[in-house]
Amino acid sequence: DGELAFALVSDWGDAPAESQAADAGLLALARAGVAALTARHPRPRGGIEPWQTRGRERRARMRLIRSILFVIWLYAAMAMVGLSLWPFVLMDDRYVWVALRSWGRATLWGLRWIIGARVSFEGLEHVPQGGALIAMKHQSMLDTIVPSLFLPRPVYVYKAELGNAPVMGAY
């Protein structure tokens, strides 16, 4: 199959600098192994290169610190919003969506100001009006939080064990 490819992906661990002394040797060893695989299994005429290397730069420790701060923000926001609106949810179900939208906005705020990531929504003109089944790819936790920001009353299907989770399970 000319469209089948394999990639060796590196994800360097955290370090005080973007590169370390051993990085060049490890990368050269990986590239030599990929070159040997390519020689043994050449690509079909017109196909893509079957063996590839891909690398991501080393992350500085500040990214780890920001990630930890964001996780604390995410769950603290969930607890604050969930617990503060819980009495209202018990009286009227519509506050479930108020809580979910509040947590979604807080999550996006944390992504922007703690992590430095901007989230954009494209293709909202294609969101169906009225009832619809929308299947998320669930590539991240955002897939469960932010739909409430652009869907009027989303309803979720989730595994039963999540119903026992503190705060979230009450909703």
Image (cartoon, helix red, strand yellow):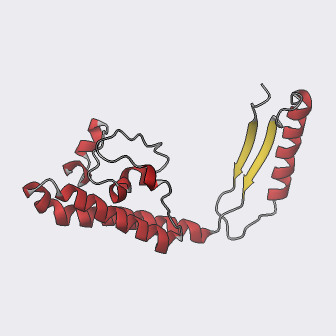
What residue sits 32% from the left and 66% below the top? Answer: 76
Horizontally, residue 150 falls left or right of residue 121, namely left
Q: Out of 140 and 37, give the one closest to the viewer.
A: 140
Up-down: is 130 above or below 57? above
Residue closest to the far right:
39
Q: Which image quarter: residue 23?
A: bottom right
What residue sits 74% from the left and 42% below the top? Answer: 8
Residue 31 location (% of width, % of height):
85, 45
Residue 71 location (% of width, % of height):
42, 62
Q: Out of 161 and 49, give the one closest to the viewer.
A: 49
Horizontally, residue 38 falls left or right of residue 119, namely right
**Total count of labels:** 0
Tell me the quarter of the image containing the N terminus.
Answer: top right
Work out whether residue 96 can be spotted: yes
Work out whether residue 141 can be spotted: no
What residue sits 36% from the left and 57% below the top? Answer: 150
Q: Which image quarter: residue 48?
A: top right
Horizontally, residue 117 falls left or right of residue 128, namely right
Residue closest to the far top:
1
Q: Out of 93 and 55, give the one closest to the viewer.
A: 93
Horizontally, residue 143 falls left or right of residue 99, namely right
Residue 85 location (% of width, % of height):
17, 63
Residue 113 location (% of width, % of height):
47, 75
Residue closest to the far left:
91
Q: Out of 43 and 23, give the one closest to the viewer.
A: 43
